[in-house]
């Protein structure tokens, strides 16, 4: 299978899940400056930005103080989180999600302006028609990686101009399938990473609808599919495609950094993997070495949350703390690994 493989043709990618910032995560809505995001995220620095490309799902707009910070159910977070992500090595944030229009077009445009100022590429919601037509492609080691990001919905808020958000409400799955096929057919990229905000919140298993949509995208040309929205980890699997390749599907990457409380909602992961083009003449892409590093968000005080690598947390702390009570750290760690290996039994995970 790996004939002609050359080192230069391999690109490593990391993805992390939802960054969903409730006011209580960063000191409350009245705190207007001196945020501490760098410290709150420092324990997972070694999981982010260590590969050729790193992406994250930014689930709240970061329009900042200019339009007033807000929390659940309509979020707006400080733009400082964007600088922290950028400094950690995040290259691109996906922003197609159900909260992207929490503060309407104005909030989205202000958030995009902040992302541009920070120098963070974004995908899935846009400032103009032209912006929405610009396919996001990152080229590394001679491989072009395209990112395509869609959300199933926008919390019932009507998308005022269709270019603003890639919504499956406006774009049937079939059109998305056509878009992916076109990228491959017209050779606009070598690898497609599809990001899909889909599925049922808090369900530990992907829904049948989610499976169906993800399988269609795999068949249409997505080499890697990253799911968000359930806010909990769902076990990944390989999907064999009619193109003779296999697609890696992370149905849900869970929360990465959020103020959500509840055992599975406080546990997330960074996912890293490699893509390679074994032979320039051969159109097939190999996805290799998927690896999960589990994370845990701890409520350090009423208004401060800190993220840890779960393996580090369990070494020093016998319990995981949630609103539902205390859980044995070791047991949760082992159970999560077991659950994540339900389809890929030899999945590399710690
Ligand atoms: Zn969501």
Image (cartoon, rainbow, N blue to C red):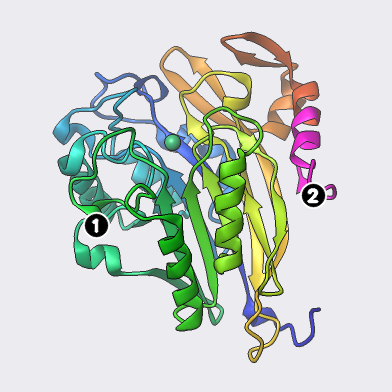
Q: What residue did someone put label 2 on? A: 344
**Residue 77, relative to residue 129: is it above or below?**
above
SS state under label 2: loop
| Image quarter of residue 142 | bottom right
Farthest residue in the bottom direction?
A: 281
Farthest residue in the right direction?
A: 346
Q: Position of residue 221 (x, y in %)?
A: 56, 69
Question: Is the N terminus in the top left, top right, bottom left or bottom right quadrant?
Answer: bottom right
| Image quarter of residue 190 | bottom right
Query: Start and end of the magenta stretch?
Result: 335-350
Residue visible at 67% across and 38% down in the picture? 294
User: Closest to the observer: 164 or 171?
Assistant: 171
Count residues near mark 2 (Cα–Cα under 10 Å), then give few for <14, some for 14-19, many for 20+. Answer: few
The answer, for residue 226, to whether it is visible in the render is yes
| Image quarter of residue 141 | bottom right
Ligand 1 is found in which quarter of the picture? top left
Residue visible at 62% across and 14% down in the picture? 321
**Residue 284, relative to residue 79: is it above or below?**
below
Question: Is the C terminus in the top left, top right, bottom left or bottom right quadrant?
Answer: top right
Q: Position of residue 214 (x, y in %)?
A: 58, 53
Q: Position of residue 68 (x, y in %)?
A: 18, 28
Residue 206, numbered circle: none
Q: What residue did someone put label 1 on? A: 163
User: Closest to the observer: 247 or 306?
Assistant: 247
The answer, for residue 252, to whether it is visible in the render is no
Instruction: Look at the image and say whether residue 38 sits in the magenta stretch.
Output: no
Ligand 1 within 8 Å of the CB at mark 2:
no
User: Closest to the observer: 90 or 55?
Assistant: 55
Q: Counting residues from the N terminus, which is met first, the one under dot 1 or under dot 2?
A: 1
Task: State the CA–CA distance, disc 1 to disc 2.
Answer: 37 Å
């Amino acid at each position: 299978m790996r004939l002609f493989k050359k080192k230069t043709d391999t690109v490593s990618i990391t993805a992390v899940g939802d960054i969903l910032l409730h006011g209580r995560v960063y000191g409350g809505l009245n705190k207007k400056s001196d945020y501490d995001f760098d410290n709150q995220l420092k324990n997972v620095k070694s999981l982010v930005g260590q590969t050729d490309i790193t992406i994250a799902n930014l689930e709240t707009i970061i329009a900042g103080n200019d339009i007033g910070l807000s929390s659940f159910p309509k979020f707006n977070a400080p733009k400082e989180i964007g600088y922290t992500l950028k400094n950690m090595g995040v290259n691109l944030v996906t922003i197609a999600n159900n909260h992207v229009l929490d503060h309407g077009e104005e909030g989205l445009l202000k958030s995009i302006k902040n992302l541009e100022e920070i120098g963070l590429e974004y995908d899935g919601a846009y400032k103009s028609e032209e912006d929405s037509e610009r396919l996001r492609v990152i080229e590394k080691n001679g491989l072009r990686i395209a990112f395509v990001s869609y959300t199933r919905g926008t919390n019932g808020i009507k998308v005022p101009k269709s270019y603003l958000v890639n919504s499956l409400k406006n774009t049937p799955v079939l059109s998305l399938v056509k878009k992916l096929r076109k990228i491959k057919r017209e050779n606009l990229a070598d690898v497609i990473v599809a990001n899909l905000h889909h599925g049922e919140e808090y369900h530990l298993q992907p829904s049948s609808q989610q499976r169906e949509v993800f399988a269609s995208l795999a068949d249409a040309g997505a080499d890697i599919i990253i799911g968000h929205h359930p806010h909990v980890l769902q076990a990944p699997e390989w999907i064999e495609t009619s193109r003779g390749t296999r697609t890696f599907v992370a149905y849900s990457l869970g929360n990465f950094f959020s103020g959500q409380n509840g055992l599975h909602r406080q546990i997330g992961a960074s996912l890293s993997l490699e893509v390679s083009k074994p032979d320039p003449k051969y159109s097939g892409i190999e996805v290799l070495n998927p690896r999960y590093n589990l994370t845990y968000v701890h409520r350090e005080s009423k208004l401060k949350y800190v993220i840890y690598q779960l393996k580090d947390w369990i070494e020093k702390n016998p319990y995981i703390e949630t609103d539902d009570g205390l859980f044995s750290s070791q047991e949760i760690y082992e159970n999560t690994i077991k659950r994540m290996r339900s389809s890929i039994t030899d999945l590399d995970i710690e």
